Amino acid sequence: MTDAIISLKGITKSFGAFKAVDNINLDIARGEFFSLLGPSGCGKTTLLRMIAGFEMPTCGEILIDGDSMQAVPPHLRPTNMVFQSYAIFPHLSVGQNVAYGLRKDRLARSELDRRVAESLAMVKLTGFESRKSDELSGGQRQRVALARALIKRPKVLLLDEPLGALDRKLREEMQLELRSLQRSVGITFVFVTHDQEEALTMSDRVAVMGSGRAIQVASPRDLYERPSSMEVAGFIGKMNFLMARLIGSDDDRILVKADGLGQVAANGDKAQLNGAEVVVAVRPEKLVLHTSEPASGSRIACHMHNSAYLGDRSHYFVQVDGLKSPLAVSTQNADAIAASELADGADLWLSWSDDALLVLPADEPEN
Amino acid sequence: MSGIGREKNRPLAIYAVFYLAFLYLPVLFLPVFSVNDSIYISFPLKGFTWQWYESMIGNEPMLNSLMNSIRVALATATISTLLGIFAAKAVTRYTLPGARPVIATIMLPLVVPEIILGTALLIVIMQAGGTLSLLTVTLGHILLCVPFSMAVLMSRFEGFDRSMEEASADLGENAWWTFWRVTLPMAMPGITSSFLLCFTISFDEFIMAFFLGSTDPTLPVFMWNQLRFPQRLPGVLALGSCILLASFFVIALAEYLRRRSSFNSDPGAITID
């Protein structure tokens, strides 16, 4: 990447025999909203703490804006962090908390007050200077932590699951707010989360992490549309997986014989496939249900296994001959077929568009 | 209202009254007899007098021993609390090789009988050719007080979120400033109680002061010496009453400071109100 603010080069962190972070190489672009996404214990927080300087990599090198952070302690790094617990100093007022990092700048009182007010205004807490930290709600504490970090005008803002403690409605509000805040200040955000929806909503790019490795680094759209492995495909949204055998390929399509579907053409990265055994993946919303056989296109007969009504959508599980487990189909209820025609056991047809299917390398059968 | 918890438990109430009386009534005899116009500590009371208090003012040796005790207690409380802060921070913040044996060693004076410690220290000081003085008493008291200070401060340090100190580092402060601006103010209630606890322990400690002291006694040793002379006993009672009153005010002050949520100052010298 030409303009990387953070470069991670072969970063590994071992705790004894356990590798919390395992050889991560990635660049984060200047001004990017970058998320580290993964289940708990995948090493995402450890990686963030290494960027902040609270943990030292066992091997590898971190560059921030071209400078090696090898021997740079946390207090000298051009990064600031919003902690998961927010870490608001309880013995200081909101204003003193926000001003905490400016001691060394030796600002005049009026300039200091102005900077604090400006920073609080940015997070919509104007006039909160003299509040005590125990008079704040969870959402307000989070904003104070944000203002306190941003007032330092860091090159990179690190956020460690900052929305985890908020209730759902507030969390969704803050997602949008954080996103627009990041746009307006133009600072690179590195955001750690285990919530895939959150990562997709907010980020320019996402690194999906698992057991200490970055499995895939891509834009939210690419992660969802073109996951590189079953692990990513299964972690981001819902996905049907069908066992298949590679038959051949032309320029941009791969021909496979998939269980239940027979011979089909699918998208995929040929270079990734190492063997005849592959998997065909298809998103539930890319399968379309019909009450009678469609005139054209890829289609197959099936019958209804069971269904779940979710308000705006419905989830159906349909049984296709030759498949052990039913396929998941998701339909917007606005264009739904009448419920009576979708009773359990009803005979139906399933169709899909040409680029709905994706070929992925088969994982070792773990689950 | 017939909440179960509100039912009166008469035997328990009687027990509580007796318990409190047993604890505090003897203490009340102190001021009562200190204004009794007789050198004998016995009922019935004779007349009312301030003469024991008046005699205190001119009692040079007594005032001297009081000053000795205050000096020893202040020094002990200050040094023990400082040592306690460093030790507690070390064992709660860093992973030290052999931390557990180190803690156990520091805590040992809690379980070793004072008389053993006193004798042992006396032998060591004698062998080393040292002279007994208030300094040796203070050293002995520090040995006794550090475990208490450490116990109070360790629970305080363990009680607060580690990310507070990380946040300070993240905001650009080195270890020294982080200690002054975050760790110390947040530990302040613990530091205050450690200081008061150590002061109290040292102020009324007898065995160490007796073994390691010279002819310049601390107050408890002085009072013990006075008990051999019956005519001086009322003077001791008067002094005891004064100390009682003083400790009441100290405790009230400490409690007031604690409730005022004492710490609201940031040595980083930035104030916004």
Image (cartoon, rainbow, N blue to C red):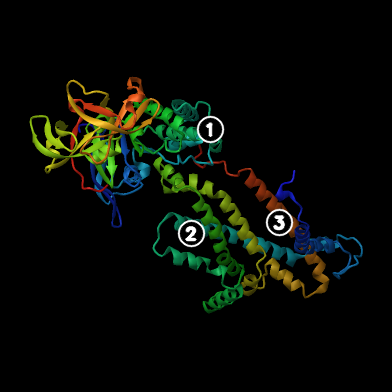
Residue B95 in percent (x, y) is at 40, 58
Residue A306 in percent (x, y) is at 34, 34
Q: Nearer the viewer, residue A265 or A160?
A: A265
> Looking at numbered disc 3 in the image, what kind of residue is underneath it?
Ser
Q: Residue at x 35, y 20 (%)?
A: A334
What's the chain of the residue with tag 1?
A: B
Q: Residue at x 49, y 67 (%)?
A: B104
Q: Quadrant of the C terminus of chain B?
A: top right
Helix, strand or loop at label 3? It is helix
Q: Residue at x 24, y 31 (%)?
A: A302
Q: Residue A66: in sight, yes or no?
A: no
> Looking at numbered disc 2 in the image, what kind of residue is underneath it?
Ala
- Mark 2 and mark 3 lie on one chain; the one further toward the N terminus is 2
**Do pointers 3 and 1 mark residues of a single chain?**
yes
Helix, strand or loop at label 1? It is loop
Q: Which residue is mark 2?
A: B87
The answer to whether residue B256 is above or below residue B100 is above
What's the chain of the residue with tag 3?
A: B
Q: Which residue is mark 3?
A: B247
Given contact means CB atoms under 8 Å apart, are the residues at marks 3 and 1 in contact?
A: no
Q: Nearer the viewer, residue B218 or A144?
A: A144
Q: Which residue is mark 1?
A: B272
A71 displayed left or right of B235: left
What's the chain of the residue with tag 2?
A: B
Q: CA distance from mark 2 to mark 1?
A: 34 Å
Callout 3: few (<14), some (14-19), or many (20+) C-alpha neighbours within 10 Å? Answer: few
